Image (cartoon, helix red, strand yellow):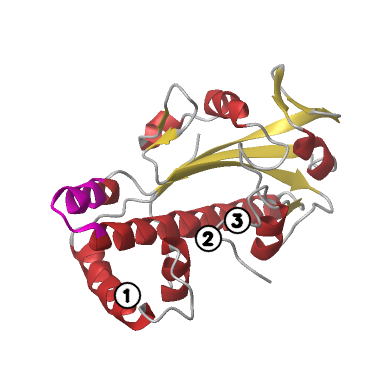
Amino acid sequence: MPIVRDIPLTLQMNEILRRTGIKADSKLKSEMETLIGQLLVSVNDEHFLEPAIVYEIYPITEVDYQQLSLEGNTALHGSALSSVLSPAKELAVLVCTIGCNLEEKVTDYFGKGEPLRGLLLDGIGSAAVDSVARESCELMTREASLRGYQTSSPLSPGGPSFPLSEQWQLFKLVPAEEIGVRLTSTGFMLPRKSTSMVIGIGPQMTTWTRAEACARCNLSKTCPYRIRT
């Protein structure tokens, strides 16, 4: 059960703007960038971000249609797993988060009648989760290279052909509570600025760019946060 806490985060202005839904050609872009800059200072000074990753790696015993079986008689379901992870020898199961401090400050801003600051700080938090997720993938790439393998791009419950209901199984495979993450009764994570994923480890694994991942999503035509090619 490795836990990683000393995680360098890269927060770029264009990513924060994208995660707040502000378009690159918006007339308010300059004003928003100024306010985001001020908020980033407070994020650093008040330690709003507490990034953490917990993961486990399991040997894969079988991959067939709609099911991926792991050592210990555990299985994950979804056609995306069988189509993307069929060459995999091992499966990394990960949960990562930025903690609850930033979310609490967002709620505080909305409660005090400062919704714009709340919205922009929430965008900073979303960009920070994206950064932790990228670091998680890099971590697994290093783990795989030690085995002479490659890694797939990540798959998350709730994505195309990977049901959200599989979230419960993921949380049985990795002790997310060790980094303060839990599931609601409907399968959503708390703190909200958290994400879960699986990554295949093996030869000739399938990968895609972030833009390609957005194109695969069921919300590709309507999502205000999508990345375009």
Q: Amino acid at mark 1?
A: Met
Q: Position of residue 163 (x, y in %)?
A: 66, 31
Q: Which residues lie in the magenta part?
A: 104-115
User: x%, y% of residue 1?
Assistant: 50, 34
Name the residue that disc number 3 marks. Answer: 222
The part of the image, by quadrant, that contains residue 84 is: top right
Q: Which residue was labeled with disc 2? A: 224
Amino acid type at circle 2 is: Pro
Q: Is residue 117 above or below residue 189?
A: below
* First-in-chain label (1 vs 2): 1
Nearer to us of marks 3 and 1 is 3
The structure residue drawn at horizontal position 25% and vertical position 65%, both measured from the top left corner, is 44
Residue at x-position 28% and y-position 75%: 37
Q: Is residue 109 magenta?
A: yes
Q: Secondary structure at mark 3?
A: loop
Q: Is residue 117 left or right of residue 51?
A: left
